[in-house]
């Protein structure tokens, strides 16, 4: 195993079986070796500055019914909300004042004209008010025309997870309203529209194997993704997707372990992309989950900058941390914990993925 890790660190491509064996690692000492190798690759390719993205959960209204998600259309147990343009701008201003360098507008998937307009106007206003702020959108599958409108309004990046790159598993976790080939088309359309493209998967889904996850990493490479956001699947009490056997601490611990292993294996394979250490990791280990993600090769964190008022109604999964924490206390805690692991926050920079910059400069030389 140590030889496999060393070859991956040296940049040799691994077979899919070898990648799967990294993801399945359970032994503590081997896991430590894996994370250390991924961390060295991260230092070499992207450095030890952590990019912060101020997360604005602008609405939990969603037209879709993904089987795992707490804000799916048919969940009648939450209050639906949508921030006003002014509220979105206030959150963006906070991110700017905190020096976060960029914001992420994330919400349920809607394609009605009003919802599309709101995003377009919000992006335009944020860009006008804070031209240096990077803008990422995470608003689900849309047509190329809508992506182009949002891009023209000033959005730079887009996150759209494939959730699982295996067609069969994708179909098991989505009802008929999500079509695998349409998700692939949407990812292509994002590239066509000129976005920096992020994707990712959930880790530890019922029935998912390390081989499936190794195939996901191969998918990230084929897509030539600039950013990766992935985290453990977390059972959600109002969502239909459940494991057949009851949840146990051992199962949660394994999903967490696989989450870190996936970050490390992805860093070793993709080198210069941005990788998020997600809230799902923090949910499983509130004290240090996200910090362990950084030490396994991630370089981005997305702290919430919205008001606490709507947090309870934006629980994509159970146990989401920081429900009562305001943006200011989240920021102070992050500063301390990031310094505590020997890293620093890269303030006031948009944090554009190196991978994207390299692709753009290659294109301009051609
Ligand atoms: N509607 C948009 C953005 C919000 S959902 C979209 O679907 O792209 C953002 C991400 O939350 C999803 O991509 C999914 O991977 C994640 N998510 C939803 N429910 C989850 C759960 N139960 N456990 C872990 N991640 C979940
Ligand atoms: Fe809607 Fe996104 Fe949740 Fe699916 S994952 S139900 S699209 S918010």
Image (tube, rainbow, N blue to C red):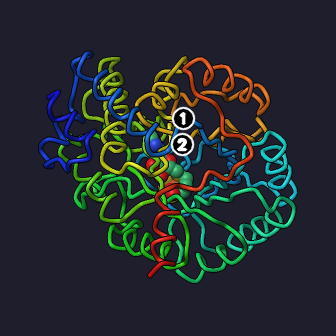
Q: Give the quarter of the image for residue 366.
A: bottom left
| Mark closest to the chain's N terminus, 1 or 2 | 1
Q: Nearer the viewer, residue 110 or 12?
A: 12
**Which one is in front, 298 or 199?**
298
Could you tell me which residue is drawn at 57 percent across and 31 percent down? Answer: 320
Cα–Cα gap, marks 1 and 2: 30 Å
**In this rendering, is residue 38 above or below 191?**
above
Q: Position of residue 308 (x, y in %)?
A: 76, 35
Q: Residue at x 64, y 57 (%)?
A: 61
Give 131 or 244, whichever is nearer the viewer.
131
**Element at badge 1?**
loop
Pinpoint residue 203: horizontal percent, then vertical percent. Answer: 34, 40
Residue at screen point 52% across, 29% down: 290
Instruction: Give the total of numbered labels.
Output: 2
Residue 85: name its quadrant.
bottom right
Q: Position of residue 256 (x, y in %)?
A: 37, 27
Measuring from the top left, give residue 121's x and y in whole percent: 79, 70
Q: Which residue is mark 2?
A: 316
In the image, taking residue 131 as reference, residue 49 lies left or right, namely left
Q: Is residue 53 left or right of residue 11?
A: right
In screen coordinates, is 217 left or right of 117?
left
The residue tagged 1 is 48
Q: Residue at x 20, y 41 (%)?
A: 209
- Under circle 2, the secondary element is loop
Mark 2 lies within 8 Å of ligand 1 (Cβ measured):
yes
Residue 259 circle label = none
Q: Mark 2 and mark 1 in contact (Cβ < 8 Å)?
A: no
Classify 10 Å Cα crowding around label 2: few (below 14), some (14-19), many (20 and above).
many
């Amino acid at each position: 195993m140590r030889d496999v890790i060393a070859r991956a660190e040296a940049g040799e491509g691994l077979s899919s079986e070898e990648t799967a064996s990294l993801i399945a690692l359970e032994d503590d000492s081997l896991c430590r070796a894996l994370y250390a190798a991924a961390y060295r690759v991260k230092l070499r390719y992207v450095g030890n500055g952590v990019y912060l993205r101020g997360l604005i959960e602008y609405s939990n209204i969603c037209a879709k019914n993904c089987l795992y998600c707490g804000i799916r259309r048919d969940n009648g147990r939450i209050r639906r909300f949508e921030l006003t343009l002014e509220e979105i701008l206030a959150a963006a201003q906070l991110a700017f004042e905190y020096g976060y360098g960029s914001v992420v507008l994330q919400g349920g998937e809607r394609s009605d004209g009003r919802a599309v307009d709101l995003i377009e106007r919000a992006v335009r206003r944020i860009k006008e008010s804070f031209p240096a702020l990077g803008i990422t959108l995470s608003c689900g599958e849309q047509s190329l025309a809508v992506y182009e409108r949002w891009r023209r309004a000033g959005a730079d990046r887009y996150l759209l997870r494939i959730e699982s790159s295996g067609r069969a598993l994708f179909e098991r976790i989505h009802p008929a309203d999500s079509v695998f080939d349409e998700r692939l088309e949407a990812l292509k359309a994002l590239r066509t529209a000129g976005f920096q493209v992020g994707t990712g998967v959930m880790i530890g889904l019922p029935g998912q194997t390390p081989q499936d996850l190794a195939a996901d990493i191969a998918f990230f490479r084929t897509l030539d993704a600039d950013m990766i956001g992935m985290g453990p699947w977390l059972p959600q009490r109002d969502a239909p997707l459940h494991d057949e056997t009851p949840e146990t601490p051992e199962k949660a611990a394994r999903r967490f372990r696989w989450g870190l292993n996936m970050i490390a294996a992805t860093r070793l394979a993709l080198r210069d992309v941005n990788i998020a250490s997600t809230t799902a990791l923090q949910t499983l280990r509130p004290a240090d989950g996200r910090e362990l993600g950084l030490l396994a090769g991630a370089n981005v964190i997305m702290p919430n900058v919205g008001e606490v008022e709507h947090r309870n109604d934006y629980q994509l999964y159970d146990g989401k941390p920081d429900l009562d924490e305001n943006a200011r206390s989240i920021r102070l805690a992050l500063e301390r914990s990031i310094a505590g692991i020997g890293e620093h926050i890269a303030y006031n920079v948009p944090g554009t993925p190196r991978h994207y910059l390299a692709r753009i400069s290659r294109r301009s030389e051609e």
